[in-house]
Image: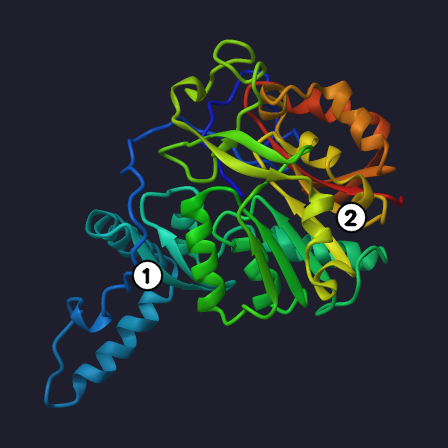
């Protein structure tokens, strides 16, 4: 699971906002690395500061007039100017918290989470706005159900590959969209928070968590850590994503590398309890360009025909040794169509034409999410 800060190339044409004259794919508009962030540290639970300890807006007067003024103040706070002030205060509190602690407990629209305070790309949006990719999840499921490609609300299992701290898998259960979830995450620090967040939301009976990378072969794989974005850790493909081979746009060659266990998705699902694996409704995958390798290890699973929501990041795929033509070849074995969420809604195209989406995105760092379906 990730939001990346990437420099946008001159040929990029896509944005999450509606660009005048350029209706295109919704994608996360990248920016530079910006401020250096605190390094990862030991995971420690830490509650939000007690609101009672925050400064009061005004003192309560004995003549009773203050209560009316306080109501007026809260009415003003709920307006646009007041909302901007609340947003600014929340931003200030986030900056304060990141100096005081490594983790923070937050309540959101998609569940309760312990988040990394040094993470500005997933954790910070969760704290500031109370959600992260929640609309993307619910809109995709509503669309799939309208096409008869997904079971009714509250049924089925979501498989979240690259689950990070659980924002998608937990959201699917917390909002009642799905009955069960399987969360797969290789990074030890993210996985520690993932398991904690499952407990926060009382989902231990409905979620299965596995600390591993989904790949094409079992064994151990090199795994590089991004010290400024916990959503951009990646499996390093030997001989392909080495320095200088496919670009080093985000300083990948300087990242620390360790080894993590890897398993094909077919093997992962075969080892789960039957109640988790028998009615998979949707696979959600965001593994920083390693999607092609994960699909190769999921031949039996994908043959069952469930839809897949996948990130498509040409730069990351190339660094993992997957070019556009090879990705098309992998996709053609399992799906007939891909769907892109544009301003007017989801638009379909034959899977044979998915290389055109690579061209639309370019190789400079832009990315989007695509629905891959076995039907039209």
Per the image, label 1 sits on a secondary structure element best described as: helix
Q: How many marks?
A: 2
Q: Is residue 229 visible?
A: yes
- Which of these two is toward me, 10 or 49? 49
Q: Are marks 1 and 2 in contact (CB under 8 Å)?
A: no
The answer to whether residue 150 is above or below residue 200 is above
Q: Which mark is residue 307?
A: 2
Residue 153 point in image, percent of width and height: 73, 68
Give the residue pinned by disc 1.
82
| Neighbours of disc 2 within 10 Å: few (<14), some (14-19), many (20+) | many
- Which of these two is toward me, 132 or 78? 132
If the image is split into quadrants, where does the N terminus sit? top right
Q: Is residue 344 visible?
A: no
The answer to whether residue 176 is above or below residue 277 is below
Mark 1 vs mark 2: which is more N-terminal?
Answer: 1
Query: Going by the image, does 6 lie left or right of 62?
Result: right
Residue found at x 47% / y 58%? 195
């Amino acid at each position: 699971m990730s939001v990346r800060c990437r420099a946008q190339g001159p040929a990029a044409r896509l944005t999450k906002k509606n660009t005048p004259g350029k209706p295109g794919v919704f994608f996360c508009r990248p920016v530079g690395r910006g401020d250096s962030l605190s390094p990862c540290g030991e995971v420690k639970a830490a509650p939000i500061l007690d609101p009672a300890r925050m400064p009061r807006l005004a003192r309560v007067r004995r003549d009773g007039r203050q209560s009316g003024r306080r109501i007026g103040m809260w009415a003003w706070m709920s307006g646009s100017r007041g909302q901007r002030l609340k947003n600014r205060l929340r931003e200030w509190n986030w900056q304060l918290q990141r100096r005081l602690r490594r983790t923070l407990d937050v309540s959101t629209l998609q569940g309760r989470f312990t988040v990394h305070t040094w993470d500005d790309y997933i954790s910070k949006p969760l704290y500031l706005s109370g959600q992260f990719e929640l609309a993307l999840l619910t809109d995709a499921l509503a669309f799939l159900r309208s096409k008869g490609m997904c079971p009714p609300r509250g049924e089925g299992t979501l498989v979240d590959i690259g689950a990070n701290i659980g924002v998608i898998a937990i959201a699917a259960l917390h909002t009642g969209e799905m009955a069960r979830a399987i969360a797969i995450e290789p990074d030890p620090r993210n996985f520690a928070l993932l398991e904690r967040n499952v407990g926060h939301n009382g989902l231990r009976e409905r979620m299965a968590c596995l600390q591993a990378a989904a790949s094409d072969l079992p064994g151990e794989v090199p795994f590089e850590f991004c010290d400024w974005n916990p959503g951009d850790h990646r499996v390093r493909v030997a001989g392909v994503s080495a320095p200088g081979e496919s670009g080093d746009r985000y300083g990948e060659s300087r990242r620390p590398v360790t080894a993590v266990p890897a398993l094909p998705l077919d093997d992962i699902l075969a080892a789960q309890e039957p109640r988790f694996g028998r009615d998979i409704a949707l696979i959600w995958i965001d593994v920083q360009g390693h999607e092609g390798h994960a699909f190769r290890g999921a031949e039996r699973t994908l043959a069952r025909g469930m839809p897949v929501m996948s990130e498509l990041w040409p730069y990351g795929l190339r660094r993992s040794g997957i070019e556009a033509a090879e990705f098309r070849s992998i996709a053609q074995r399992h799906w007939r169509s891909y769907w892109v969420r544009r301003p007017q809604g989801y638009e379909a195209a034959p899977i044979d034409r998915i290389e055109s989406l690579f061209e639309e995105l370019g190789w400079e760092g832009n990315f989007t999410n695509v629905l891959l379906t076995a039907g039209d």
